[in-house]
Image (cartoon, rainbow, N blue to C red):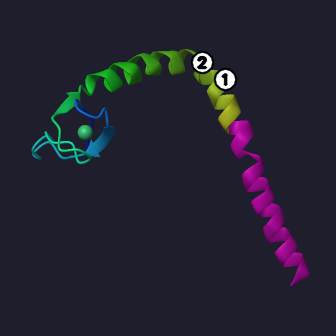
Amino acid sequence: MPTYSYACKECGNSFDAVQSFSDEPLTVCPECGGPLRKLFNSVGVVFKGSGFYRTDSRSSKADTTAKSDSTPAPKSETAAKVEKATSS
Ligand SMILES: [Zn+2]
């Protein structure tokens, strides 16, 4: 489901709405009933796109971080299991 960002022209209320492609776009501010401006989603897409490339270039670092981050969890899980097994 795509997320659309809206901003109210009247009160400046901005929010994200998860809508399907077939849903009617929101036009009325839920806060004040003023006209809504649809913040174009492509801003987020562009951000994500450039982010992909940046993340890609330092993916090795991210991988290392993720690995070193996730490694202790299974270890402690195993330790907990061993503890349980030992105590029971
Ligand atoms: Zn409003």
Place of residue 33 in the rendered image (x, y in percent of width and height, measured from the top left) = 17, 44
Reply above or below: 55 against 83: above
Beta carbon at label 2 within 8 Å of ligand 1: no
Place of residue 69 in the rendered image (x, y in percent of width and height, measured from the top left) = 72, 41
34 or 51: nearer the viewer:
34
Reply above or below: 55 against 71: above
Which amino acid, mark 1?
Lys
Place of residue 82 in the rendered image (x, y in percent of width and height, measured from the top left) = 84, 69
Left or right: where 71 falls relative to 84: left
Q: Quadrant of residue 36?
A: top left
Left or right: where 62 falls relative to 72: left
- Which range of residues does the magenta coloring cover? 67-88
Place of residue 15 in the rendered image (x, y in percent of width and height, measured from the top left) = 32, 40
Please report the residue visible at 74 percent of the width from the left and 38 percent of the height from the top. Answer: 68
54 or 82: nearer the viewer:
54
Beta carbon at label 1 within 8 Å of ligand 1: no
50 or 26: nearer the viewer:
26
Find disc 2 in the rendering and name its residue: 58
Please report the residue visible at 51 percent of the width from the left and 16 percent of the height from the top. Answer: 54
- Which residue is most to the right? 87
Reply above or below: 44 against 18: above
Tell me whether circle 2 and circle 1 mark residues in contact (CB < 8 Å): yes
Left or right: where 66 falls relative to 51: right
Residue 32 magenta? no
77 or 1: nearer the viewer:
1
Q: Residues within 10 Å of mark 1 (few under 14, many from 20)?
A: few
Element at badge 1? helix
Ligand 1 rendered quadrant: top left
Which amino acid, mark 2?
Arg
**Residue 61's disc number:** 1
Q: Quadrant of residue 49?
A: top left
Q: CA distance from mark 2 to mark 1?
A: 5 Å
